Image (tube, rainbow, N blue to C red):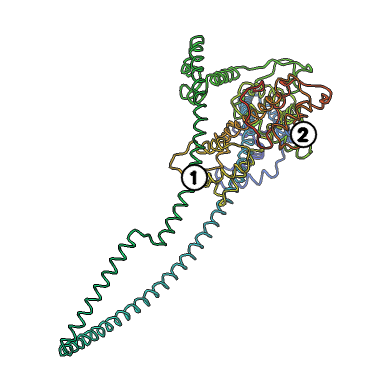
Amino acid sequence: SFQFSARGHWSTWPAFGSEQTILGNHRPCCAPEERRSSNKQALLTIPKPRYLEELESYLRKELQSLDLTKNNSQELKLQPYREIFEFFIDNFKTYKPLLSAIKNEYEVTLAHQKKTIRALEPLKAMVTTMSDECTQRILALQEKEKDEIYTLKQEKQHLLKFIANMNEEKSSLQTQVEHLQTSVAEEYTRYLNEYSARKLLLAKLNDMHNERLEMTRRQAQDVKGEDAVKLTLALKVARQDLTKAQVKLNTMMADYGDVVPRRKFESLEKKYSHLLQEMKALQEDFDQLHKEYKTLLEIHRETAQERDNFCTQLQRVQQNCTPRPNWAKCSEVIPGGAEQWDCLAEGKTSEELVDVLLEEIGTGALRERNVFPGWGKGDKVPVYLRHEGEVKNKKLTKKEVVNTLKDVWKEKIALEQQTGKRSSLPEFFLSYLQKKYGDAAAMEWSYTLYENMRVCRSNHVLRSFYDVLTGKVDEEHYHGQNQLISNLQKELAACDSSNSGSLTSQQFRQEADSVREAFPLKRKESIQELVDASRCGLDSTEDLINYISLFKEDEEGNAAPFVAKFRSQYVREKQEYLRQLKNKLGDLTEVKADDLKAAFCSIDPDIDGQTLDTYVGLAYQVRREEPDREAVPVGLVLERLLAGDVRRVGPSPVEGSTAGFEGE
């Protein structure tokens, strides 16, 4: 079925015809071009080999039977061609090794290419993912830059308006300068004319003076001609009049030498009355100061006695107690070294330093733990910790914990504003984690957040959330404190008429009076503490106070000294309020609702009925107890009130006692 050339080569029809046709048409003397044209004409009459037609027919049938809609259609299409090539190899024994080697090399190359494609498929997916992420980042940057572009445009408009105003002011000043120049020219002309007129007037006055002298000289010449007797008589009469006047003057000086004029007398009498009143006022002030001095002297004696007692107690304590530890050694084990420890220990007592050290140790141990043991699923276990077995530690940073807790507060407040009902923080905390991270990872987040809150007690965000979550503090305590801080920020913003975000020292001192009006129950010392805290970190020469920065927090939720001082005053004022309440209750071990109301009204006369009922309900837990029938221990009442949002409504009628109570 296959044909070969006369020289023994394999025929690749239709490049060559049969042996007879080629030999019959072979003309060695003719030119190659003529032979090529004659061969082409002869080939048109040569039929295909039968084996070639069978292979082509087989190939068409196989290709038609394939489903080319599948993903691997190219591999399926390659299979018939591979079989045709194997038929060639099997039929041509002479070329079989070479053709097999060629086929194997192609197969190895195809396998290598497939392997390369499979290795590149994850990279393709990764490139697609990275492309999507880059697109999202570009869109996010574009969104972020939109606000910046909008802000810059607003600033540009403001500057353009400012330039226009300055140009208008420049034009106005130029007009004023031209007007003043015209006025100066007119004044110069007027003064010049006046100068000329004065010169003329002086010339006239000199002429008149010369004429008067001439006239006087002429009159003197006329007087010389009068009678000398007449002049002698006039002189004698004048001397007699002078003697009389001298005698009268001497008499008056002798009679009225010690007499004061009435006008001077009335003035001195008025001044004397005024000085007498001032002396009486000063005498009264002196008497008051004398009384205060005696009181202060008595207080000084008592203070000196207390000081001596304290010195004695101090000496006794120093003898009995252990020496103060060398806290500088802690810098060797605290991450960050001496610099970090100095920052943590600044301004803290020994008890506070122990808390800081425990927190640092607990935080380090928490980072090393990989799992937490589950608390079980009992009824006494909080709902957000009910789990059997071990729980994975997410090993969150303090910044991530603070951001998560802030987001929980934000979502909870939004839900309560939408529904109008107060929800339980433990249940909402669990539902929030399940909704955001899924049921499987919710417990991991819950345990990790709980342990971080339990260890980090110095952070306000973590401590306040932990106290509310565990029931140590009522949620109203947290919201009430934040509301007071918000009101204080509004008072400061109201004083900033230019909306610049800063106040001068004088404005801030004036604002302190406004704050005193907004918080009339705060003492002058507390207001001064807030003013001092606002200047923390400023130079003594700086006059501007950026009041917006007073309310900012760092990335770990730590508040500025101003807000920290305000929160400490809030706690201190509440403790003082409850201290007065305890002193009013006296030696009672249990108290009824009516007695508690009477004590509240006694120490806070301005308290209204609704607030009083709220405080009593908080103290007696009305949903679970019956305050009208059952008395509650005083310690439990004070503990519940300390956990809630309890504040003084009106000014205190008397100074409270300094005695402590169990709630502190």
Q: Which mark is residue 422?
A: 2
Q: Quick one: label 1, few (<14), some, or many (20+) residues within 10 Å?
A: few
Q: Earlier in the sequence, mark 2 or mark 1?
A: 1
> Which amino acid does the dot numbered 2 rest on?
Arg
Q: Which mark is residue 355?
A: none
* Depth check, front residue: 530 or 74: 530
Is label 2 or label 1 in front?
1
The quarter of the picture where the C terminus appears is top right
Q: Nearer the viewer, residue 175 or 436?
A: 175
Horizontal side of 87 relative to 119 (left or right) equals right
> Residue 106 is drawn in which quadrant?
top right
Total marks shown come to 2
In which quadrant of the rendered view does residue 262 lie? Answer: bottom left
Q: Report x, y in % for residue 602.
A: 71, 32
- Residue denoted by label 1: 280
The N terminus - image quarter: top right
Residue 466 screen position, x and y as percent: 67, 25
SS at mark 1 in the image: helix
Left or right relative to 7: residue 197: left
User: Disc 1 residue type?
Assistant: Lys
Q: Position of residue 53 (x, y in %)?
A: 74, 36
Find the distance from the CA under tag 2 to the CA under tag 1. Answer: 65 Å
Q: Residues within 10 Å of mark 2 (few under 14, many from 20)?
A: few
Report whether residue 295 is seen. Answer: yes
In this view of the protein, which residue sits in the foreground, 631 or 181?
631
As drawn, 346 above or below 60: above
Q: Residue at x 46, y 24 (%)?
A: 339
